[in-house]
Image (tube, rainbow, N blue to C red):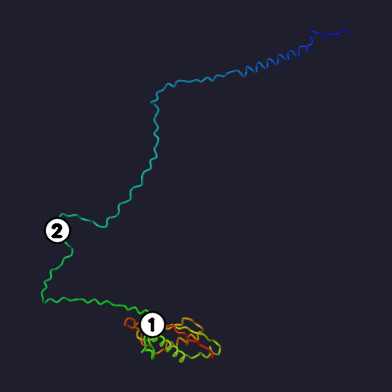
Amino acid sequence: MEKRKNENADIEKSRMSWRALGFVASLALLLAAFTWTSYAISVTSKLDFDTSLLEEEDIPVNIIQPPPPPPPPPQTSMIEIVDDDEVIEDELQVEDLDLDENTEIETIEVIEEVVEDDTPFMIVEHMPALGPCKDMRGDERHQCTQMEIIKYVTKNTKYPPIAKDAGIQGTVFVYFVVDKNGDVKDAKVLREVDPRLDKEALRVIQTLPKFEPGKQRGKPVSVQYTIPVKFIIK
């Protein structure tokens, strides 16, 4: 059988040529795109108008006003300036008094009340004395008086039967003052043991006889004492 295909019409032979040609054209287009330069065109238009027609805008300025000054202090008095020749009338009028030798002037005597400080002393020049101690001086007088107080308290103290039966014993300290008249005052219990014993110790101290008062610089003064009253069951 005779072949109808024309060898000159075979396109497979020219495929490689067309392919190479296509690559070349593509490369040329790519290079042309990279080398293309774009130019920006700016269009300006002339504004034909009068600039004086524009209104100027006032920009407000923020101004801080200073605080108002403080009010002046109130005037408490008015000072009036007068000339030297002007006579100022005094509000106080002094009457002329005709005094002679026979005129009696009444005098007012001001008596100042002197309040004496009666704070009791602990130690004075001449301590209070009791009984035979009045003829003594100095420390001997003071020690003798303390012994006389202890003797009196020991002799005149009565042990409360209820406290004795209950076996309650101890030492009660009593404070008192010998005033400037020699009397005992302000007696109080400083250290308590039992209400019954405390009451008896206070009673005995309040019955102490009259003292010869103590003296400081020759004047009678008050002197304080603290005496132990012992309750012992024998």
- Residue depicted at 48% across the width and 81% down the height: 191
Front-lying residue, 79 or 225: 225
Q: Is residue 229 left or right of residue 182?
A: right
Tell me: residue 82, above or below residue 103. above
Do the residues under discs 1 and 2 have CB atoms within 8 angstroms? no
Q: Which mark is residue 87?
A: 2
Q: Crowding near pointer 2: few (<14 within 10 Å), some, many (20+)?
A: few
Out of 220 and 144, give the one closest to the viewer.
Answer: 144
Q: Specify the amino acid type for callout 2.
A: Val
User: SS of the residue at dot 1?
Assistant: strand
Quarter of the view holding residue 202: bottom left
Where's the C terminus, which quadrant?
bottom right
In the image, is 186 to the left or to the right of 7? left
Q: At which x and y percent is residue 212?
A: 36, 87
- Residue located beneath label 1 in the image: 223
Quadrant (top left, top right, bottom left, bottom right) of the N terminus: top right
Question: Which residue is located at x 40 percent, y 25 percent?
Answer: 51
Compared to residue 123, the image places residue 131 above or below, namely below
What x and y, as percent, mark residue 144? 41, 88
Label located before the other in sequence (1 or 2): 2
Note whether 62 is above or below 131 in the view shown: above
In which quadrant of the rendered view does residue 213 lie? Answer: bottom left
Viewer-closest of 93 and 145: 145
Task: Indicate the position of residue 166 as horizontal and vertical percent values.
Answer: 56, 88
Pinpoint residue 5: horizontal percent, then vertical percent.
Answer: 83, 9
Which amino acid does the dot numbered 1 rest on?
A: Val
Q: Secondary structure at mark 2?
A: loop
